[in-house]
Image: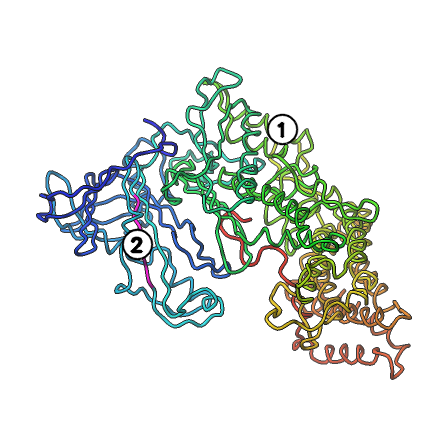
Amino acid sequence: MKKFLLITGFLIFPLVFHAQILGKTGLQKFSGYFDFYYDQKEDKIYLEVKELDSEFLYVNSLARGLGSNDIGLDRGQLGQERIVKFKRAGNKLLMVQPNQNYRAVTTNLMEKNSVEEAFAQSVLFGFKIEDEKDDRFVIDLTPFLIQDAHGVANILKDKNEGDYKLDGSKSALELARTKSFPLNSEFEAIITFSGRARGRNIRSVAPTNDVITVNMHHSFVKLPDDGYKPREFDPRSGMIFINFMDYATPVHDPIMKRYITRHRLEKKNPNSAVSEAKEPIVYYLDPGTPEPVRSALLDGAKWWNQAYEAIGFKDAFQVKMLPEGADPLDCRYNVIQWVHRSTRGWSYGASVVDPRTGEIIKGHVSLGSLRIRQDFLIAQALLNKPFAERDDNYQPMLEMALARIRQLSAHEVGHTLGFTHNFASSVNDRASVMDYPHPMVTEKGGEISFDGAYDTGIGEWDKVTVAYAYSDFVEGTNEHAELNKILDKASSDGLRFISDSDARAAGGAHAYAHLWDNGKNAGGELKRLLKVRKIAISNFSKDNIRNGDPFSMLEDVFVHLYFFHRYQAEATTKMIGGLDYNYAVKGDGDLIVKPLDSKDQKSALEAILLTLDPEHLAIPENILRLFPPRAYGYNRTRESFQSETGVAFDPLSAASTASEFTLDFLLHPERANRLFQQQTLESGQLSLDDVLRTLIENSFQKKYKESYLQEVQHMVNVNLLNHIMDLAVNDKAYFQVNAIAYAALEDVERKLTGNLEPQSYSRHYKHIIDQFKENPDKFKMVRAPKIPDGSPIGTDLCNFN
């Protein structure tokens, strides 16, 4: 049997007939995987069920979304895939979802039944049997299709956007996108919700915010045949995986089974070093994507064929335009979709996966259309007077933004091929497109260069993951041994793989895995990046916007330059109290875990201090004179500098925000705990005492003759004081860490005692400390204005950005 995914399919066109089975006339019949009938007079679909207890895949998705990244209900968003079957119960057919999390993979039917009966199943819907004949049953599918299958009302309620209920009087079937093919049947409905809007997000995107209409799509898909062989998951492989408990497992083996997710791919000639695929993996681009973005997305997605060629496949991965009239949610197509929202947000790659085996049936990429505009603004901020001579000099910025779009296309497609993030690729010269890349900009003769800002092809680690997932081994090969060889070679080549939780700055501890960073050493790169930033700031002028643009727009360009170092600073804080480790397995010989060397931690702290230095934090006065109060119609947004001076631009709050960003990560209680623990186990390590003492010496004891710089220093001081007090009472910190922070507070107080003249701020600092000592339980962190959004706004979705 041909594999489901790659069948281009054909549509059996609707025809008018006399439905004997229903006793009605004038119904349209759609023939395919499921035959069904449409009654236009009643706007109903009747489904014919030919086989009871026959499992198939049910997938719900959102064909028309809300357009708000914060709410998260996007056009093309996949819902949950579920294996289901129809079971008769009296005068009903029940749609039953068996429990795939607990199984017995065995030929012993009684053993299978014992596990099935031990765990709950789910009945998703009950249908009255409208007619039956020759073991065929007809049910009214309409109530199933016109329901809130995607959980829209609950999502809106959970996000405090309002209370909504499905309004059946304003809902209907969408016949234009309801079709049936040999191996899948696709249904769609227009679903309306009525209620009362509460949140600003729903008000910003709905034309009438008490009535919201979306389209929900439902796919009934024939399960793939048993020709696919699951491949075991290895934590070193960089693969996304499914897992379940197999109660047929012998006691001496692990009961939890893990299989990687991947498309089915086989060579036509498995004995040949290079062979075409029996059926290539084909991705289709949304034709609604405009140029030049369209070409950039096609180019970036095609990079993956380099990795498939490296394992002996010829043209096994292809990217084409979606055929005219094809539905992006049709399960026969892997799709790259260009998604519009009212605000900038995350892109993501999702997949429809066979829960039994991990076989990917459909990959679906959603790319936020506003992302490219952020990269354009970053480039606009970095360049020296791009609009000094003419206003159409946008090509340098556009080229950098398109370079990022190519990488983003490859990244999100990678998720749908089965690959997770690799945030350790920066230390290997950008070895993976599955990292979050920061533009690698350089300085040449006092000018900023974008040469090599983003990578231009697949990385060496990406070739490893493709080899692990998609290598087609000759029959009789010891697959487990060959897969180990792939991973062992990657390790011997110095390639690293570290994924999400280990790389996130707040709780992550890995010293060489970070988001939005560059370079082998985060601290060294931070120092270099601050020099680039300084040059770009010295070049910044009114000519960074076009003639006729309000100067308020200049401020919105500059914000990307001022905080340009933020993620490299975040990465550098992770070196302090950081660990070096691998997802090691017994026998692989890789490093298991060790603290980062004290010398490297101290070097990182030295780099971090630069981000707290008023020389870096103070916006030059010549630039401040270019930032008037916001122009009418150009209000501040969450992507703007925030102000505590009303309509005026607030440089002191900008400095406070930037310094608090560093201190939030540097003095995170989990990092403080690690610092204490490392120094306890190894006396030569950087200690929490060292960090706090160094911070105090470089803040409260620093003085500037220039009043502007001194006031910036006071903004840093008060932030540091708040963070030390927070660490002294934080219930997530060790008792010992609380005590060390409290001692540091007393150290600050001692240093202030000799400087209590009325005109100084020392008295007020001491007053804050005294108040804290009197009522530590009532302490509440005083926050600087929130840092403008840098990463895509909102929450990571599905397989992340």
Which type of secondary structure does the marked residue at label 1 adopt? helix
**Position of 312 relative to 7 (above/below):** above
Left or right of residue 511, residue 69 in this image:
left
Q: Give coordinates of residue 146: x percent, y percent.
A: 28, 57
Which type of secondary structure does the marked residue at label 2 adopt? strand
Span colored in magenta: 186-192
Q: Residues within 10 Å of mark 2 (few under 14, many from 20)?
A: many
Residue type at the position of mark 2: Ala
- Report the residue marked by disc 1: 488
> In the rendered image, which quarter is residue 246 located in?
top left
Quadrant placement of the N terminus: top left
Q: Residue furthest bottom?
A: 758
Q: Give coordinates of residue 277: x percent, y percent.
A: 45, 24
Q: Give coordinates of residue 170: x percent, y percent.
A: 28, 64
> Which mark lies nearer to you, 2 or 1?
2
- Residue at image coords 41%, 66%: 207
Q: Which mark is residue 189?
A: 2
**Position of 681 relative to 199 (above/below):** above
